[in-house]
Structure formats: structure tokens, C-alpha cells
Image (tube, rainbow, N blue to C red):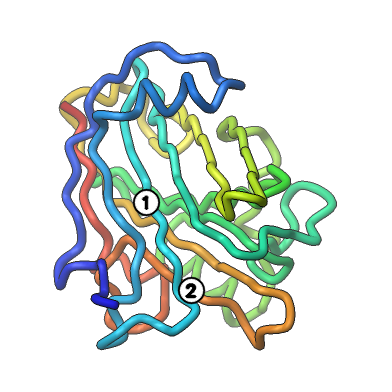
Amino acid sequence: MANPVQSRSPQLECRPVAAFEQGDLASVREAMNGAASCDLGQSWLAEPERDFVPGTVRVGRRHNVLVMLAELTDRDIFSAATGPNQRLWELGDVFEVFLRPETQRAYVELQIAPNNQRLQLRYADENALKRARETKSLDGALVGRELFQSNVWAQTPEQKWWVLAMIPADSACEQPGGLAGSEWRFSFGRYDYTRGRRGPVISSSSAHTRVDFHRQEEWGILRFS
């Protein structure tokens, strides 16, 4: 199987999309059908792992809200998460979003599990990430207020789950302003667990040279037309 991630991270034009019914997957998929997209892969490997399965993310915007739809193939869809702001990547399958407007150092990390539990983190800068890793604590990065909305559809017979995430601009931006004409750094990641397998299969939209989703120099670029 060829590795689906290119040698350089994606640059996506984030264009307006038509209105959709948030709770209706068919409506969401129709609205996002022509949106810019990128695939998840394992660019740090010459060939993907045997258990790697595809994931695709489409991006668009509704006014000042970033809209993302992830379609994730998954042979064993599950999460043991029971509440918000738990360490979702240790509890089962999870889809992750990293966003940083080009004009600032602070960035957000947003995680969504198949049961729609969410983890919301904001790092003021790279030093904040370093402190979190050294202390093994997320307390300084956790965001209690709701930063975004999400819907999840898990279809076990089809071995797929979908994540709709709607993220207002001011959830990531320190300064108020519209999305139009701006550029953000971004990355999408995934932990795909299978019960009985030792450890998850990890994949990303970014051309990472090693497994570290926080390597911002390897993130892609979102341009809001």
C-alpha cells in the first residue's frame, strides 16, 4: 500500500459551503462534497503499518465558523471516555485537530471521540507545551468553556465513523476578526485503537518526520478565501 501522505504537508483553500442540517450526516456530506480535502497517513514511515486504514478530512467555512468533516475507516470503533476533557488519546479511538492563526503563537488542540466526548486544550506557546510534557499535566492547558460544536456518526457495519466539527474563529484567534483573507496553520491526527492489538495506529495529515503531532513546522496551511 502506498503511503497516502505527500512529502510536504497540505495547503488547503477553505471556501464557503452551503447550509446544512447539523444532525443529518447526508445533509452534511452533500454540503461538504466539493470542499478541499486531505488524507491522513504515516509520513514518518516508508510504508504504512499493516493495520493502517484510511481517513479523509474536508474543510470549509460558514461565515466565521470553520467546518470540518472527517471520514474515518475503523474496524473497531470504541472509546472508554465518560466525560469532557479526559485524556481521550489514551481511552480509545480519537480524531484530533490542531489550529494556529499565522499571526499568533498560541494554538488549540481539539479532540473528539466516537461517543462525541471532547478534549479542549490551548497552549499559549511552545513553552506551555514543554511544561505540560515535563509535568505530565494538562491542567494549565485545559479549556472549560465550549470552544466548538461537534456531531459524530458511528456505523459499525460499514466500519466507518464521521466527525463534524464546527469551530468559531474566536475559539482559536486571540484578536477578533473574520476568517476571510486569513491563513492558519493546521494539522489533523488520529489514534486508531483495535482491541487486542498492542497500541494504536497513529496517522496525521501533516508530513511529520517523527511521531509528534505538535511539530508546527510540519503542519499544513489553511487559506480562507
Q: Residue at x 50, y 57 (%)?
A: 73
Q: CA distance from mark 2 to mark 1?
A: 14 Å
| Residue bearing the label numbered 1 | 56
- Identify the image quadrant of residue 198: bottom right
Q: Position of residue 221 (x, y in %)?
A: 21, 49
Task: State the residue in front, 40 or 179.
Answer: 40
Q: Residue at x 35, y 56 (%)?
A: 187
Q: Is residue 57 shown left or right of residue 222?
A: right
| Residue bearing the label numbered 2 | 202
On residue 80, which mark appears?
none
Instruction: Residue type at mark 2: give it.
Output: Ile
Q: Position of residue 4 (x, y in %)?
A: 26, 67
Vertical order, 225 against 205 (above or below): above
Vertical order, 195 against 68 (above or below): below
Instruction: Residue type at mark 1: give it.
Output: Thr
* SS under mark 2: strand
Label 2 Cα neighbours within 10 Å, binned few <14 / some 14-19 / many ≥20? some
Task: Give the farthest residue toward the top.
Answer: 19
Q: Position of residue 170 (x, y in %)?
A: 44, 29
